[in-house]
Amino acid sequence: MDLYRFPFDSHTCNITLQSTAYSVYEISIDEITNADGITGRSKELFQAQGEWELIKINVTKAIINVIYEDLNLDQLIYQITIKRRPLLYFINFMLPVFIFLVLDVMSFFIHGRGTDKLSFKMTLLLSISVFLLILNDTLPSTADQIPLIGVYCSAIFILIGISILETILVNLLKAKGKRSVETTAAVTGPNGKSRHNI
């Protein structure tokens, strides 16, 4: 299965019927009805409440020539196209991860100490880590390409990580600025003139 577009993927499965020993003159394989009739009847019988939806069934008839036996074989190919229902994965994975990203952006408007923001952002990062672990268990392992949903979650994970580094840098600059202000203080003397102590 090609899972690159998971959970918005669709797949095609071929079922081929043919005789291996009898020629087209001895056995003829024909479809009962056309592709539209088969698709309509199959959709009535296909009552799965799971994650797959039947899209269509195509029927192709061909005659295959077996050269080494000099036989013409009748062949009937049913091409079944199914599509995954993405709503469950959208609600369980994509939407919460996007909400975490929005919360991370909104955390810049939190008033308070920098440690509060940092702990909040670390909680978001750990939440996305849990989502990535669940997603890793849900997806079958593929060697060719990483699915787009994995790229999406990883990109948001990296953005929140960069946001944490930015928060740490801002807190460091604030702490250095506060230290320099504390070392330079204005003191007012008894005659009303100000003296600066460094």
Image (tube, helix red, strand yellow):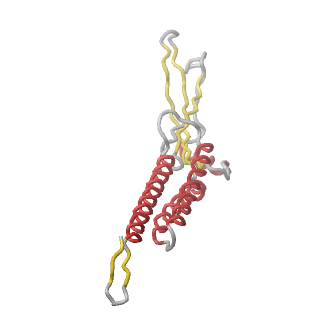
The image position of residue 59, as x and y in percent, is 53, 37
Q: Position of residue 193 (x, y in %)?
A: 31, 86
How many numbered marks, from 0 up? 0
Which quadrant is the N terminus positioned in? Answer: top right
The single residue placed furthest to the left in the displayed view is: 193
Q: Nearer the viewer, residue 170 or 101?
A: 170
Q: Position of residue 144 (x, y in %)?
A: 48, 34
Residue 6 placement (x, y as % from top left): 52, 46
Residue placed furthest toward the bottom: 191
Quarter placement of the C terminus: bottom left
Q: Is residue 90 left or right of residue 183?
A: right
* Residue positioned 54% across, 60% down in the render: 95
Q: Is residue 83 above or below residue 65?
A: below
Residue farthest to the top? 68
Task: Compare residues 175 and 156 and report the one nearer the observer.
Answer: 175
Could you tell whether 181 is left or right of 156 in the image? left
Residue 197 position (above or below residue 156): below
